[in-house]
Image (cartoon, rainbow, N blue to C red):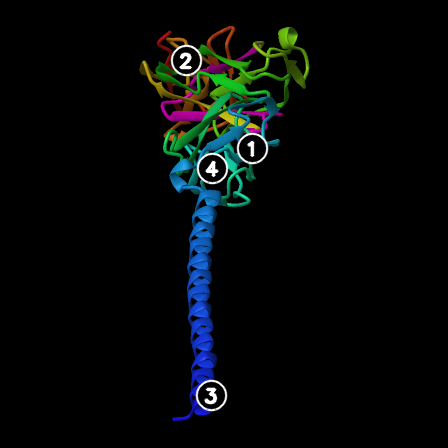
């Protein structure tokens, strides 16, 4: 090989070597770049995980922590809003929201059940008292707060209204002799928190043996206004006229919103103490008056002339006698049967 050819060969080798070296340098850089990108990605993933936090770091906080609605008229309603805040670093998951009884309170739906760190949601609590009394309940909120998985919110309030009470609610006079008499007292009371207006009283019965006395001399005419704690008395008299059972109902109308029409029952049984039968034969004098041997229960008098019931007579209490409008015929048999009072 001559010198010229050797120089070309060396030149060729010298040109190739740098190309190979540059190619190796690019691979190393590329490899280095790839490693750097992977590290950054790993660093980014770790950073994201740190930003979102662990759910075990969730924290639930409510405001207010208790609610007192005060006094409300019965059947009216008031609403209060409760805010739930995630005070932790993790995501708060609310699993349930409930009331212990729900007798006078109700709760609305939550605006959200998943709360990222620092965010809040709300729900409403409504109080609507059905009766005039004190009410209490408890809201329970369940979430993934490791330190406090159940948060309770005490609720309280009172219903305000007039409330009518009739005492006693029932009266049984028991058995009483015909023509005797007894009196029972019924007390109407306002056991509520507002003025009670009694607008009407009535007595429902098919018997004239039971009667109502409103005692207007003491109570005055209706309507009656009873302030809280005030009472009025009315009276029911039982005077049986026969040996049958009797019942009646005192009906009271008022502005009690829960029970505007109330009633109390009264019952009794008449009993005969004894019966008499007086028999007379009409004489020639044509008598019209026949005196009885005992005082009768007037309503039980039955008069027969010759076996037929007649009504052309009256009872004269002054003389304790049956007086005919027209004298029975001479020789007629007059029979007078009646009950004898036992009192």
Q: Marks 4 and 3, Cα distance to the nearest angstrom?
A: 73 Å
Upstream in sequence: badge 3 or badge 1: 3
* Residue at numbered disc 1: 82
Upstream in sequence: badge 2 or badge 1: 1
Q: Marks 2 and 3, Cα distance to the nearest angstrom?
A: 166 Å
Q: Secondary structure at mark 2?
A: loop
Horizontal relation, residue 149 to residue 207: left or right: left
Question: In the image, residue 287 lies at what x, y percent?
Answer: 48, 15
- The numbered mark at residue 8 is 3
Crowding around mark 4 (Cα neighbors within 10 Å: few <14, some 14 to 19, many 20+) is some
Q: Nearer the viewer, residue 320 or 7?
A: 7
Number of the front mark, 4 or 3 = 3
Q: Nearer the viewer, residue 63 or 102?
A: 63
Q: Marks 3 and 1, Cα distance to the nearest angstrom?
A: 92 Å
Q: Secondary structure at mark 3?
A: helix
Per the rendered image, the range of residues in magenta is 231-259
310, above or below 121, in the image: above
89, above or below 134, in the image: below
In magenta stretch: residue 226:
no
Considering every residue shown, the one lying at the far front of the view is: 2
Number of the front mark, 2 or 1 = 1
Q: Marks 4 and 2, Cα distance to the nearest angstrom?
A: 98 Å
Which residue is found at the position 47% from the left and 37% from the top? Answer: 89
Upstream in sequence: badge 4 or badge 2: 4
38, above or below 15, in the image: above
Q: Answer with the quarter of the image where residue 93 lies.
A: top left
* Residue at numbered disc 4: 89
Upstream in sequence: badge 4 or badge 3: 3
């Amino acid at each position: 090989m001559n010198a010229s050819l050797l120089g070309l060969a060396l030149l060729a080798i010298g040109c190739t070597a740098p190309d190979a070296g540059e190619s190796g340098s690019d691979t190393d850089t590329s490899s280095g770049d790839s490693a750097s990108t992977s590290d950054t990605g790993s660093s980014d993933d770790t950073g994201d995980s740190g930003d979102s936090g662990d759910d075990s770091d969730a924290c639930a906080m409510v405001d207010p922590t208790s609610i007192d609605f005060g006094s409300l008229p019965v059947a009216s309603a008031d609403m209060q809003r409760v805010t739930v805040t995630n005070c932790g670093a993790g995501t708060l998951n609310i699993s349930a929201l409930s009331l212990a009884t729900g007798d006078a309170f109700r709760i609305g739906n939550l605006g959200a059940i998943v709360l990222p760190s620092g965010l809040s949601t709300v729900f409403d609590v409504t109080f609507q008292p059905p009766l005039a009394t004190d009410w209490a309940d408890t809201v329970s909120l369940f979430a993934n707060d490791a330190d406090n998985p159940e948060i309770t919110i005490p609720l309280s309030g009172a219903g305000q209204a007039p409330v009518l009470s009739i005492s006693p609610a029932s009266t049984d006079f028991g058995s009483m002799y015909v023509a005797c008499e007894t009196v029972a007292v019924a007390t109407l009371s306002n056991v509520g928190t507002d003025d009670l207006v009694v607008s009407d009283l009535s007595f429902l019965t098919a018997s004239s043996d039971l009667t109502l006395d409103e005692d207007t001399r003491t109570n005055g005419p209706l309507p009656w206004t009873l302030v809280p704690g005030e009472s009025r008395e009315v009276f029911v008299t039982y005077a049986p006229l026969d040996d049958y059972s009797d019942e009646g109902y005192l009906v009271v109308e008022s502005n009690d919103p829960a029970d505007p029409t109330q009633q109390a029952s009264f019952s009794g049984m008449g009993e005969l103490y004894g019966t008499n039968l007086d028999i007379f034969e009409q004489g020639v004098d044509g008598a019209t008056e026949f005196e009885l041997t005992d005082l009768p229960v007037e309503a039980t008098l039955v008069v027969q002339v010759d076996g037929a019931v007649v009504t052309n007579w009256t009872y004269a209490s002054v003389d304790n006698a049956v007086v005919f409008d027209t004298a029975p015929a001479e020789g007629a048999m007059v029979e007078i049967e009646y009950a004898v009072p036992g009192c």
